[in-house]
Amino acid sequence: MTALQNMWFSFFGLFLMFVSAGLTVLSQKLPSFWRVLLLVISFLCLVVAGLIVFMVVIRGPLAE
């Protein structure tokens, strides 16, 4: 994976973190079933984002 691909991969992880936060805020205004569904999706987005960021950080700097 090149440094540019690594950058886009990390941006996708950050995007998933923002999606997770947005879904959590949105879920507070919905009925019980939809709240639980959005919170589960939010949690999954957060876990995937955490794994992506972990992989990017562990790989370290990439030389071109």
Image: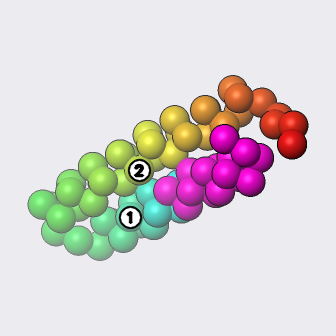
Determine the residue positioned at 73% across, 45% down: 2
**The C terminus - image quarter:** top right
Q: Which residue is mark 1?
A: 23
Q: Would you say residue 27 is visible in this rendering?
A: yes
Secondary structure type for disc 1: helix
Q: Badges 1 and 2: C-beta atoms under 8 Å apart?
A: yes
The answer to whether residue 2 is magenta is yes
Q: Three-letter amino acid code at disc 2?
A: Cys
As drawn, the residue found furthest toward the left would be 33
- Indicate the quadrant where residue 63 lies: top right
Is 56 rendered above or below residue 39?
A: above
SS for dot 2: helix
Residue position for label 2: 45
Q: Is residue 18 toward the left or the right of residue 33 in the image? A: right
Separation (CA) of disc 1 from disc 2: 10 Å
Residue 59: image location, x then y, percent: 71, 29
In the rendered structure, which amino acid carries the disc numbered 1? Leu
Left or right of 7, for residue 28: left
Assess disc 2: are there few (<14), some (14-19) or many (≥20) residues with their C-alpha within 10 Å of its C-alpha: many
Task: Name the residue nearer the viewer: 10 or 39.
Answer: 10
Residue ID at (37%, 54%) = 42
**Residue range of the region highlighted in magenta in the rendering:** 1-16
- Asked whether, in this view, residue 26 is left or right of residue 15, the answer is left
Which quadrant of the structure image shows residue 4?
Answer: bottom right
Find residue 6 and name its label: none
